[in-house]
Image: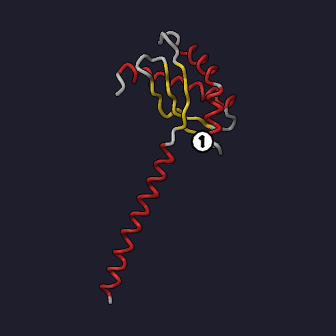
Amino acid sequence: MESKRQQKFAGLLQEELAAIFQREGAAYLPNTLVTITRVRVSPDLAVAKVYLSFLNTSNTTLSVAEVNSHAGEIRYKLGGRIRHQARVVPTLTFFLDDTNEYVEHMDKIFDKISRERKEPEEEADGDAAI
C-alpha cells in the first residue's frame, strides 16, 4: 500500500510526464500518442515505474524500448519541471500498461460464457415446443 506522500508524488510525476510527452513526444515516437496511465513510486521516492499506453503504433514492445532508451533525457526534462517541488528526481523506468488488452480478453471470455449459457436454454425451449 502506497503512502499519501507516494501517491501525491506519483500524481505530480504523472502530470508532468504527460505534459512532456504531449509537447515533445513526437521526438521519441513520431505519429504515436502516448498516455501515462499510472506511476508507482518507491517509498524513498528515488525510483518511479511509469506505465504507458500507446495509440497508433503497431509494435508496443518496440515503443516501450524506444522510450526507455530516452529515459535519461526525459528525466532531465522532468527535473527542470519539478526542481522546486522535489528534492530528488527519481530514476524512471517505463513499462507497457496492458490493462486494455486484459479488458478485451476478459470481455471475450464473458461473451463466450454468455453464448454457452444461451445455447442450452434455446435447446430446452425447442424441446418444449415439440
Color style of the picture: secondary structure
Question: Camera-side residue: 83 or 3?
Answer: 3
- The C terminus appears in which quarter of the rendering? bottom left
Q: Residue at x 63, y 30 (%)?
A: 67
Q: Quadrant of residue 119?
A: bottom left
Q: Residue at x 63, y 33 (%)?
A: 65
Residue for badge 1: 55
How far across and how far down the image is residue 51, in percent?
51, 33
Determine whether, in the image, residue 3 is placed left or right of residue 86: left
Residue density around tag 1, few if under 14, some if 14–19, many if 20 or more, within 10 Å: few
Q: Residue at x 35, y 22 (%)?
A: 3
Q: Secondary structure at mark 1?
A: strand
- In the displayed structure, would residue 94 be above or below residue 121? above
Task: Please state the total of marks drawn on the protein image.
Answer: 1
Determine whether, in the image, residue 123 is placed left or right of residue 97: left
Q: Residue at x 34, y 28 (%)?
A: 1
Determine whether, in the image, residue 72 is placed left or right of residue 119: right
Q: Quadrant of residue 79?
A: top right
How far across and how far down the image is residue 89, in percent?
52, 15
How far across and how far down the image is residue 122, in percent?
36, 77
- Residue that lies at the very extreme toward the left in this rendered image: 128
Question: Camera-side residue: 22 or 87?
Answer: 87
- In the displayed structure, would residue 28 be above or below residue 117? above
Determine whether, in the image, residue 44 is placed left or right of residue 82: left
Identified by mark 1, the residue type is: Leu
How far across and how far down the image is residue 125, in percent?
33, 80
